[in-house]
Image (cartoon, rainbow, N blue to C red):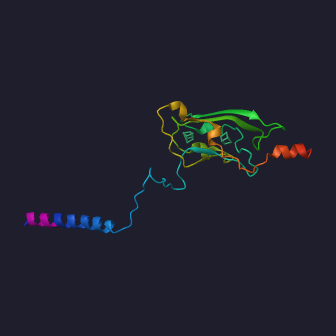
Amino acid sequence: MALINEILNNAAAVAKGMGVTFKEMLQPTVTEVYPEGPAVFEERFRGVHVLQRDENELEKCVACFLCAAACPSNCIYIEAAENTEEGRISGGERYASVYNIDYSRCIFCGYCVEACPTDAITHGHDFEIASYNTSTLVYRKEQMLTPLPADFKPLVVEEQSSGGGH
Ligand code: SF4
Ligand code: SF4
């Protein structure tokens, strides 16, 4: 009797499992076709960083080093420089003349993003950075900075032509 019960239970389990299989066979295919097609991300996916610009297209990074201090992998390298009347790069006193992230060490934890007081650094969705050459994994500011719009005119040129000063 116990043997018959076991056989019946097993048959019921198989039928239940196959029921799920047949049900899924009738559903639309949801398989992502990456790399043939684009990868699909959730909005909060943490990929290669993006250095943001403000509404005047100035760099948001003011070289405060808080992101580097928060980084548990010690993979952010920054050199700070002063903005001048002739050339304003960021909205603050200083800007990052060098801003590197070493992606051979970055663990995409997001601590740098959370630490940034100006929302200058965010995570983008780029993730295809695998390389046999680790030197290519050190990304420079120019690789991460949001590009300027094609019709952008630098503020400093307008200030100089109008004779304005601070
Ligand atoms: S995501 Fe984490 S590990 Fe990567 S640079 Fe930011 S703080 Fe460092
Ligand atoms: S990215 Fe943000 S936290 Fe890092 S140096 Fe620039 S302003 Fe400071």
**Is 138 or 150 nearer to us in this picture?**
150
Q: Position of residue 99 (x, y in %)?
A: 65, 36
- Say if 120 sits above or below 4 in the image: above
Q: Residue at the right extreme?
A: 163
Give the image location of residue 160, x and y in percent: 88, 43
Residue furthest to the left in view is 1
Left or right of 119, for residue 38: left
Magenta: main secondary structure equals helix
Residue 137 placement, left or right of 98 = left
Does 111 sit above or below residue 7? above
**Residue 150 point in image, percent of width and height:** 72, 50
Q: Quadrant of the N terminus?
A: bottom left
Quadrant location of the C terminus?
top right
Q: Residue at x 78, y 39 (%)?
A: 93
Asked where in the image residue 4 lies, by quadrant, the reply is bottom left
In this rendering, the count of numbered labels is 0
Residue 7 is covered by the magenta coloring = yes
Residue shown at 57%/48% (left/top)?
A: 124
- Residue span colored magenta: 2-8
**Ligand 2's quadrant:** top right
Percent of width and height locating residue 127: 51, 45
Q: Residue at the spot x=33%, y=66% of the render?
A: 24
